[in-house]
Image (cartoon, helix red, strand yellow):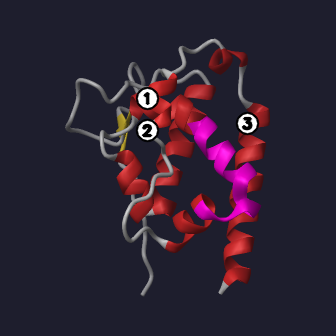
Amino acid sequence: MFLPNIFLCLNYLLTVIRYLTSVSKRLAKMKKPSKSFLNRGLFSNVTNPCDLYRVIRDEGRCSKLKSGIEELWEIYYPYADGDFPKQLSQDFHARYWEMYLTCTLVGNSFNVVPKQGRSEGPDIKIEHASLIGLLIVRFVIG
């Protein structure tokens, strides 16, 4: 049971490390959220989290992975739905992909529209582009 979780943690850790090392200087200049906002926690003690969320939150061996995901959250929070932390705990793969993709677009100088002020519409909206918005879709087999 734990062996696949370890491989998933390592896979996510490598992905996060690759992303963080390739981030542009633009991200370093972005306004950071307040510490009180971040202290509310992306990894909180929610009831019935998915297995991967629980492992990343609770297992010490995933502390670097957890830290990397929280760094992505510092970039992603303006683009997230209001209940994103709860959604992440229930559907980690889909919500992580949404966060990672948005951060990658922002890091590559796409003009991603923050979620504040728009409750409807796509998960990711890019302004002044031929691609107006992206709807994140996850395929489930089985």
Instruction: Identify the residue position indicated by label 1 in the image.
Output: 37
Q: Is residue 125 magenta?
A: no
Badge 1: residue crowd in 10 Å (few <14, some 14–19, many ≥20): few
User: Which amino acid lies under the numbered mark 1 shown in the image of this protein?
Assistant: Phe
Tell me the tag on residue 20. 3
Q: CA distance from mark 1 to mark 3?
A: 21 Å
Q: Position of residue 142 (x, y in %)?
A: 42, 87
Q: Earlier in the sequence, mark 2 or mark 3?
A: 3
Instruction: Identify the residue position indicated by label 2 in the image.
Output: 40
**Left or right: 1 in relation to 136:** right
Q: CA distance from mark 2 to mark 3?
A: 23 Å
User: Which amino acid lies under the numbered mark 2 shown in the image of this protein?
Assistant: Arg
Q: Is residue 70 magenta?
A: yes
The residue tagged with tag 2: helix, strand or loop?
Answer: loop
Q: Position of residue 117 (x, y in %)?
A: 23, 23
Q: Nearer the viewer, residue 139 or 3?
A: 3
**Left or right: 84 in relation to 41:** left
Residue pictured at 54% horizontal, 67% vertical: 54
Q: Is residue 105 above or below residue 50?
A: above
Can you tell which of label 2 and label 3 is closer to the viewer? 2
Q: Which residues are magenta?
A: 58-72
Note whether residue 11 is visible.
Answer: no
